[in-house]
Image (cartoon, helix red, strand yellow):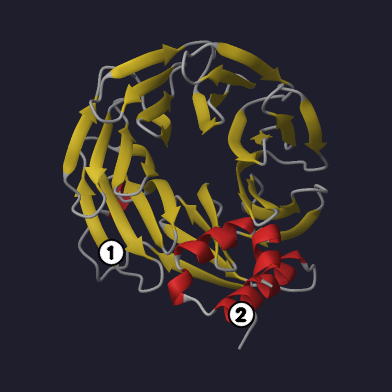
Amino acid sequence: MKGRLFETLKSTALSYASEKEKNNEVQFCLKSLKADLRMRSPRVLPKAEIFNLVPPSTEQFNINEFFVKSTKFEGKRVYTSFDDRTIRVWDMESKEQLLKIVSPNRVTEMIITKDKITSGDSEGTLRIWNKNSGEEILSLADGHNSAISSIKFDSDRIYSGSWGETIMVWDASTGKQVMKLEGHKESITDLQIVEGKIISSSSDGTIRIWEAETGKELFVLEDAMGEITSLQVEDGKLYSSSFDGIIRVWDIKTGQLLQKMEGHNFPITVIRIFDGKIIGVSLEDKEMVHIWDINTGKKLKSLKSTQATKILNLNGFDGKIYASNTYNEILSWDFNPKK
C-alpha cells in the first residue's frame, strides 16, 4: 500500500515521509488514496470552507490598507504579506496568527525555506528574515529598480525577477550579486531552478532557459499568445500556463514543445502540480479552480471561488486544496471521506 502511495501520490508521499513518526501507515495511505479518488470523481463534491486572515478580534487595523499581496503555503502554515508592509504567519488549523514581521516597504513576493523567509518588496529590495523570530538577517539591494515579482532559492544562491526585464542572481550568505540575466522584453512572471538551469517566464510571451552556473541562454520557448503566467516542473518536464488558456508541456533538456492542454476559454493565471494532477486558476466571472489529470490533460473537476477577486496561490496538502485570494481569505476544499 505504501508503494502505491509513493508511486502515484508523490506530493502526499513527501509529506508522509517528513512526518512518518506521527502517522499510522495504513490509515494514512488509505485516507490519501481515497481522497485522490474523490478528487478525480465527477460525482463527489468537496467540503468548502473559508478562513478569514484578519478576524476582528486579532487587532485593530485600517481595512482599506489591509489586502493580501502575496502568499506562500508550507504544510499547515500560510505566510502572507499585506499592503500595510507586514508579513504574517498563520496556522490554518487553529486559525491563529503565529508571527508578525514589519518590513520597511510593501512586500510583493516571498519564498519560504528551512529556517528563513526571503521577501522582495515594492522598491526592488530583497530581505532575508529568521522564520521563527522575524529578525532581519540580510538585505539585498541595488539590483532591481522595480517591484520583485518572483523569488527562488537553490543551494547557496537566490534568484529574483521583477516587474522590470532582468533576473538577478545573489550569493545567499553574503548578499553580493553573482550575475544579471537580460533577454526578456517585459516583466518577469515566474522562475524555476532545476537540473542546473534557470527557467524564466515573462509578460512578453516567452520562456527562457539559462545555464545556472554561467548565465548562458540555452533556449527561448515561444508558442503562447500573451503573457506566460506560471511555471511548474515535474519529471523532467516544464508545465506553463498563459493568458491564452492553454497549458503547455515542454522538454527541459531540448526545449521541445511536447503537448498542449487546450479547450479552455479563459486565461490561466496560476498552476500547481499535486499528486498526478494539475491544479489551476482561471479568470472567469468568479475565479475558478480547475483540476486536470497531468498525463491525459482531461479536466477532472472545477471549483468555484467565493469572490470575484484575484487568487494568488494554490496548494495541495493532506487531501485538501487551498487557495489564497486578495480578499484576505484562504479557501479550502476538503476531499477526505466523511467519518
Name the spot of residue 33 as percent of width and height, x first. 68, 71
Q: Which residue occupies the extreme front position in the image?
A: 3
Q: Quadrant of the C terminus?
A: bottom right
- Residue drawn at the location 62% of the way across and 27% of the way down: 227
Instruction: Judge whether 326 appears above or below 52 on screen.
Output: above
SS at badge 1: strand
Name the spot of residue 91 as percent of width and height, x first. 35, 66
> As rendered, which of 64 and 164 lies closer to the eye?
164
Circle 1: residue type: Gln
200 sits to left or right of 96:
right
Circle 2: residue type: Val
Q: For residue 306, say whether it is visible.
A: no
Q: For residue 76, say whether it is visible.
A: yes
Name the spot of residue 130 as percent of width and height, x first. 22, 47
SS at badge 2: helix
Q: Using the image, tell me which numbered label, if any, was put on residue 302.
A: none
Q: Earlier in the sequence, mark 2 or mark 1?
A: 2
- Residue drawn at the location 72% of the way across and 30% of the way down: 250
Q: Using the image, tell me which numbered label, if any, was put on residue 97.
A: 1
For disc 2, the neighbor class at 10 Å (few under 14, some 14 to 19, many from 20) is: few
Instruction: Judge whether 287 appears above or below 144 on screen.
Output: below
Q: Which residue occupies the extreme bottom position in the image?
A: 339
Label 2, label 1: how many angstroms apart (C-alpha)? 33 Å
> In the rendered picture of this protein, how many numbered marks are placed on residues?
2
> As rendered, which of 277 and 204 lies closer to the eye?
277
For disc 1, the neighbor class at 10 Å (few under 14, some 14 to 19, many from 20) is: some
- Residue drawn at the location 48% of the way across and 68% of the way down: 50
Q: Quadrant of residue 4?
A: bottom right
Instruction: Judge whether 153 appears above or below 74 on screen.
Output: above
Q: Using the image, tell me which numbered label, if any, was put on residue 26.
A: 2
